[in-house]
Amino acid sequence: MQPTQVRDLQGLINEQNAALKPQTDLLNKDIAANDASGVAQIAGLDAKQKTAFGQIEQTAQDKGQFFSGFSPDAQAGYTAGTYLPALAELQSTIANTRSNLLGKKADLGKSAFDSAFQTREGDIKTANDWKRMTADQQFQREQTASTQAFQKAQAQLDRNAQASLASANRQAQADNNPTTDQFLVQSFAGYQPRSQEFANYTEREVIPSLKANYGLSQKDAAKLAYSYRKSVYGE
C-alpha cells in the first residue's frame, strides 16, 4: 500500500508539544511557585532585618547610644554580616532552581523537536523506499516486456529460417541436389581449423555457396555454416 505523504515538521512538533503539555504545565507551575517562594523568602529576610534593626535601636536607646534618628554601627554590621549573605544565598538558590526548571522545560522542547524530526525522517525514508520500489517494479516490467518482445521476434526469425531452410532442402531434393546438411559435409571436407590456408574459408566459400545454391539470406546462410563448423570443429 502506498505510504502517506511526508508530514509537515511544524505540525509534528505541535503534536509532540501537545502530548508533553501536562509535563510542561507542571514545570511552569513549579517555576511560578519558585518565583513566588523567592519573593516571600526575600520579604521574610527583609522582615527579619527590620526586626533586628528595631532590636538594635531599642538596645541602643536603652544604652543611650541612639540619637537624632541615627542607627548605630550594629545595624551596618547586621546588614553586612547576616542580611546580605543570607540574601545572596537565597537569590542563588532561587536562580539555580529556576535555571534547573527552565532546563527541564528546554529538554522537553528539544525532545518534542527530536521526536518530530525523526518521525518526518521516517516519512521521507518510507516515501523514498516506495519510489525506489515502484521504479524498480516499472523497470522490471519494461525489461520483461522487452525480453519477451525480443524472444518473440527471435522465435519468428528462427521459424522463418527453418522454413527457408526446409524450402531450400525440398527444392534441392526436387532437383536431385544435395541437402544443406550434405552440402556442408562436402564443403568442409578437408577443412583444417586454425590453418592459414583456410583463413576466412567459411566467409569466402561456404556462405556464398549456400546463398547461391539454396537461395538463403546472408544471415541464414551464416548461421547454418557457423553452427555446423562449431559442432564439428569446435570453432
Image (spheres, helix red, strand yellow):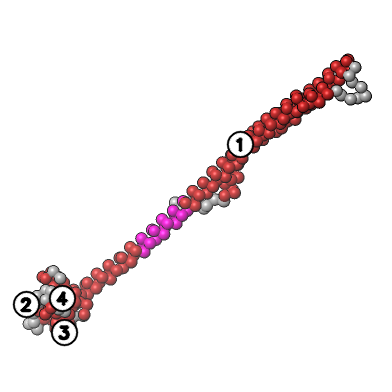
User: Of callouts 2 and 3, which one flags the residue occurring earlier in the amino acid sequence?
Assistant: 2
First along the sequence among labels 2 and 4: 2
What whole-number distance in Å separates the C-alpha atoms at marks 3 and 4? 14 Å
Q: Measuring from the top left, give residue 38's x and y in whole percent.
A: 72, 30
The residue labelled by disc 3 is 212
Q: CA distance from mark 1 to mark 3?
A: 96 Å
Residue 180 location, x and y as percent? 12, 77
For the point 57% across and 49% down, the residue is 9
Disc 2: which residue = 190
Q: Earlier in the sequence, mark 3 or mark 4?
A: 3
Between circles 2 and 4, the one closer to the viewer is 2
Q: In this orientation, which residue lies closer to the viewer: 218 or 156?
A: 218
User: Would you say residue 129 sits in the magenta stretch?
Assistant: yes
Asked if the residue at tag 4 contacts the one at tag 2, i.e. Cβ–Cβ closer than 8 Å, the answer is no
Q: Residue at x 38, y 62 (%)?
A: 139
Q: Residue at x 22, y 75 (%)?
A: 160
Relative vertical location of residue 230 with respect to residue 199 in this rendering, above or below = above
Label 2: few (<14), some (14–19) or many (≥20) C-alpha neighbours in 10 Å: few
Q: Secondary structure at mark 3?
A: helix
**What type is the residue that disc 2 sits on?**
Gly
* Mark carried by residue 225: 4
Q: Position of residue 13 (x, y in %)?
A: 58, 45
In this image, 76 relative to 23: left or right?
Answer: right
Q: Give amino acid for label 1.
A: Lys
State how far apart marks 2 and 4 are (Cα): 15 Å
**For the residues bearing labels 2 and 1, Cβ distance under 8 angstroms:** no
Question: In terms of depth relative to the viewer, which is nearer, 206 or 156?
Answer: 206
Horizontally, is 63 left or right of 44 in the view? Answer: right
The amino acid at mark 4 is Ala
